[in-house]
Image (spheres, rainbow, N blue to C red):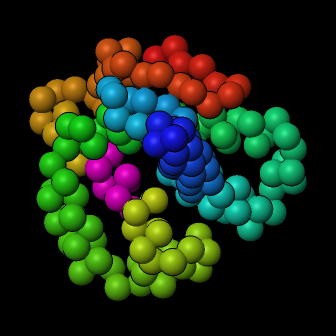
């Protein structure tokens, strides 16, 4: 009897955990050097991207082909960000963001108007990746390398698995 009860409890725990895992978008859409890019992360970038293009009144935003291309581009950008974040010092990013805010007081208000998102989301989804890209570019320029070449090399060398339907990875 205890065996059946234990099996039932284990089944309930696994079922509840699976439901939570999927319902909260915690499942990976890709692995980059064994670090996951979750569906939640992807959605947090994709949704504002589409909203941004809709505010620009681009007629092709409603086109399914455009949305599929944006889905691919967002996933590609998240993979690039993972590769950069693995190489760059996070403290340098925070210092650079603080410097930008000190130099430009209107950045916070302008970002909320243009991107229609909170300052915290803007900082995490737009500003942080851009600052990391610029810092990486500066470090590479000091070594006479281009960011495009470095990214291409890193994409080729990276271990990337894409689990999202309709996507593939060829570096």
Q: Is residue 86 magenta?
A: no
Residue at 24% over, 81% down: 102
Above or below residue 133? Residue 120 is: below
Q: Main secondary structure of the magenta part?
A: helix
Above or below residue 149? Residue 30 is: below
**Residue sitting farthest toward the front:** 1
Percent position (x, y) of residue 101? 29, 77
Residue at 62% over, 31% down: 164
Foreground pick, 51 / 11:
11
Percent position (x, y) of residue 133? 32, 45
Above or below residue 37? Residue 159 is: above
- The image quarter containing residue 167 is top right
Residue at 38% over, 53% down: 130
Residue at 32% over, 15% down: 157
- The image quarter containing residue 147 is top left
Above or below residue 152? Residue 16 is: below
Is residue 125 shown left or right of residue 91? right
Percent position (x, y) of residue 54? 77, 62
Count of numbered tags:
0
Is residue 159 shown left or right of residue 119? left
Foreground pick, 108 / 90:
90
- Residue range in magenta is 127-134
- The image quarter containing residue 31 is top left
Q: Is residue 88 visible?
A: yes
Foreground pick, 102 / 68:
68
Q: Is residue 25 visible?
A: no
Percent position (x, y) of residue 131? 31, 55
Is residue 169 shown left or right of residue 60? left
């Amino acid at each position: 009897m205890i065996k059946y009860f234990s099996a039932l409890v284990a089944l309930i725990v696994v079922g509840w955990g699976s439901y939570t895992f999927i319902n909260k978008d915690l499942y990976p859409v890709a692995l980059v050097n064994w670090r996951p890019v979750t569906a939640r992360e992807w959605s947090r970038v994709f949704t504002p991207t589409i909203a941004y293009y809709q505010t620009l009144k681009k007629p092709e935003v409603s086109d399914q082909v455009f949305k599929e291309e944006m889905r691919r581009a967002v996933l590609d950008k998240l993979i690039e960000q993972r590769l950069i974040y693995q190489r760059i010092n996070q403290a340098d990013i925070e210092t650079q963001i603080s410097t930008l805010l000190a130099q430009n007081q209107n950045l916070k208000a302008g970002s909320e108007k243009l991107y229609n998102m909170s300052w915290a989301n803007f900082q995490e989804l737009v500003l942080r990746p851009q600052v990391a890209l610029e810092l990486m570019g500066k470090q590479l320029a000091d070594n006479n390398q281009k960011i495009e070449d470095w990214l291409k090399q890193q994409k080729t060398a990276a271990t990337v698995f894409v689990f999202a339907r309709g996507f593939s990875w060829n570096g």
